[in-house]
Image: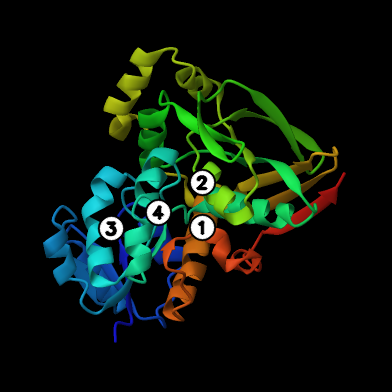
């Protein structure tokens, strides 16, 4: 019986943070990466490790014979992860990653039937932004008898990791989606604004049509109209509108030199996040759920730790599965998390 859980990509910023703040060594965790330096880290923690590339599905499969689930904290790009996901499906191994953007999530969604037939759960979107908005949306959907419109948003403050910056810059000019009448509709980001409120303050967010909420939250709520919003700095909004593209490309090219690996320990401990879900029905009734939580990367690794606990219990759902499958218990009890519900 396969019982071990492979956490791959632990040498990056998020992976290191997971080891520092969310690793539970009582669980059957195996560490994975492509660099041999991982062996030293694994030895210090007293954990088994696997060193392999994720460019060959057959080679990957050889490392998964005793692995029940893979949690991928490395690249969020489907193009990079395709062989790893294929190997997981082939070997009956559940798969979790941090992908949150529509293009990558739609590719994974295409594998739903194959994964479901093999009893394999595919759970992208296991990081802060989709975990919290998906759960907030699921809670909000229960507050009205027949909700018809769902608006979701999140706000983070302070630095992002280099990996996050690269991903955001890479996708900034892409066309994404909103959901209208239950269908995905091509939509440009930063084409509309909305103000969300929390702790007595208003935050102006722009629509972010690249967020995978239009996929996960539709599965969680079946609400036909869904728009996702993000709280982004002015310069990124300009990139999303197709402006200053030369600067965007330069920042992508020199990201390693220009940006810090990620927030400092003090920043991780002092910053916070907000996630919103606002539902409306045809009669004009509405309700709002606000989740206040710790800094985004801290929230991510804490949520990953909770998901690993569920994987260790074999609490899984075959096929493409949104994070709200685990309910609000996934985030309740994490330090700094507070959920506020308002009916309007």
Query: What residue does disc 2 label?
Result: 215
Query: What residue does disc 4 label?
Result: 14
Crowdedness near tag 3: few (<14), some (14–19) or many (≥20) residues, C-alpha within 10 Å: many
Q: Nearer the viewer, mark 2 or mark 4?
A: 2
Q: Say which label, 3 or 1, has the lower sequence index.
A: 3
Judge from the rendering whether residue 188 lies leftward or rightward of residue 61; answer left or right: right
- Measured in 3D between alpha carbons, the distance from the residue under mark 1 to the one under mark 4, in whole angstroms, is 21 Å
Q: Say which label, 2 or 1, has the lower sequence index.
A: 2
Front residue of 296 and 168: 168
Judge from the rendering whether residue 155 lies leftward or rightward of residue 142; answer left or right: left
- Measured in 3D between alpha carbons, the distance from the residue under mark 3 to the one under mark 1, in whole angstroms, is 16 Å
Q: Say which label, 2 or 4, has the lower sequence index.
A: 4
> In the picture, residue 14 is in which quadrant?
bottom left
Residue 150 image point, x, y percent: 68, 42
- Measured in 3D between alpha carbons, the distance from the residue under mark 2 to the one under mark 3, in whole angstroms, is 19 Å
Residue 114 image point, x, y percent: 32, 61
Q: Is residue 58 above or below residue 224?
A: below
Mark drawn on residue 85 = 3
């Amino acid at each position: 019986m396969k019982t071990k859980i492979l956490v791959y990509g632990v040498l990056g910023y998020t992976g290191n943070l997971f080891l520092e703040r969310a690793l539970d060594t009582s669980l059957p965790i195996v560490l994975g990466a492509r660099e041999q330096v991982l062996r030293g880290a694994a030895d210090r923690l007293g954990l088994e490790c696997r060193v392999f590339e994720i460019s060959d599905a057959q080679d990957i499969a050889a490392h998964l014979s005793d692995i029940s689930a893979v949690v991928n904290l490395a690249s969020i790009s489907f193009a990079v992860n395709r062989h790893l996901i294929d190997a997981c499906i082939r070997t009956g191994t559940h798969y979790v990653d941090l992908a949150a953007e529509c293009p990558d999530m739609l590719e994974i969604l295409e594998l739903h039937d194959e994964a479901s037939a093999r009893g394999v759960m595919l759970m992208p979107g296991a990081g802060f932004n989709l975990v919290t908005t998906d759960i907030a949306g699921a809670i909000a959907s229960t507050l009205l008898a027949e909700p018809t419109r769902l608006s979701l948003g999140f706000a983070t403050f302070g630095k992002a990791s280099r990996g996050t910056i690269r991903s955001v810059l890479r996708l900034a000019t892409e066309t994404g989606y909103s959901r209208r009448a239950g269908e995905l509709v091509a939509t440009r980001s930063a084409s509309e604004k909305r103000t969300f409120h929390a702790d007595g303050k208003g935050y102006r967010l722009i629509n972010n049509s690249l967020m995978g909420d239009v996929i996960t939250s539709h599965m969680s709520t079946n609400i036909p109209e869904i728009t996702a919003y993000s709280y982004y700095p002015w310069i990124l909004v300009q990139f999303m509108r197709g402006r200053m593209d030369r600067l965007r490309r330069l920042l992508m090219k020199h990201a390693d030199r220009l940006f810090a690996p990620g927030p400092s320990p003090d920043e991780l401990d002092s910053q916070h996040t907000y996630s919103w879900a606002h539902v409306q029905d045809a009669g004009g009734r509405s309700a709002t759920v606000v989740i206040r939580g710790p800094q985004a990367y801290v929230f991510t690794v804490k949520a990953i730790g909770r998901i690993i606990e569920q994987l260790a219990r074999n609490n899984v759902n075959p096929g493409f599965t949104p994070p709200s499958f685990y309910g609000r218990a996934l985030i309740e009890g994490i330090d700094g998390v507070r959920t506020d519900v308002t009916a309007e």
